[in-house]
Amino acid sequence: MKVLFFLLFFISINACEKNVSLPVKQNVMDDKNVVDLVKNNDAEGLRMALEKGADVNTQDSRGRSLLLLAVVGKKMKIAKLLVEYKADVNLQDQQLDSPFLFAGANGQTELVKLFLKNGARFDVFNRYNGTALIPACERGHVETVKVLAHTEGFPINHVNRLGWTALMEAVILGNGSLKYQKIVQILKDKGAKDIADKDGITALEHAKSLAYEEIVKILES
């Protein structure tokens, strides 16, 4: 009887051991590794990670998305790959930079065009409550200004937290040179209004006080 009992006990234990499933080591890439792939410009590695389920909208410790990191690092191939996998072009970091806003501010016209075709929003603003157009005008990015100003529905007369429009920044933060003259002409042609600043001074009045004669002619024409 005892022999039969031990035999049955041994068979039961052996069966249980065979049914125990050992933990499977998962090949899941953590956020840091995905971020590193972008920083290292590893397009093939990134594509593999995305195919295996990595979050295309992963953000680093500063809230910068993979796409924003690619834009900041001027990694065009990586940026296009992320957009292909439906990365959010409006996702903002802790400083309220987004891929679209940053590309506009820094004159990355090709990316601006790409983002406009892939969901760029005009109601997402930077830390100055400004659009992509305003800093593009300030910094003299003529081609970027042209693209944005000719985009249907873009808020060309948006006023930022400082009380300035794109036209105002082109005048008071520019230097009156040819590229700023071109920007003022583009804005005027697309219906930009000369909205006064918080002190009640218009862009035309600023242009006169700064002796920007060509810009004065454009605004008065």
Image (cartoon, helix red, strand yellow):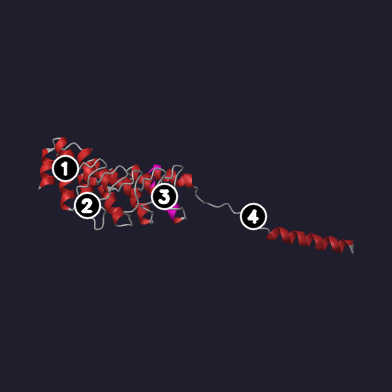
Q: Secondary structure at mark 1?
A: helix
* Residue 73: image location, x then y, percent: 34, 42
Label 2: which secondary element:
helix
The residue mark sitting in front, 2 or 1, is 1
Q: Amino acid at mark 1?
A: Leu
Mark 4 lies on residue: 22
> Which callout, 4 or 1, points at the residue further toward the start of the chain?
4
* Closer to us: 81 or 206: 206
Residue hosting label 3 = 46
**In-front residue for pair 211/112:** 211
Contact check, label 3 and label 1, Cβ < 8 Å: no
| Disc 4 to disc 1, C-alpha distance | 75 Å
In the displayed structure, 26 sits above or below 128; it is below
Q: Nearer the viewer, mark 3 or mark 4?
A: 3
What residue is disc 2 on?
149
Q: Secondary structure at mark 4?
A: loop
Which stretch is magenta? 39-50
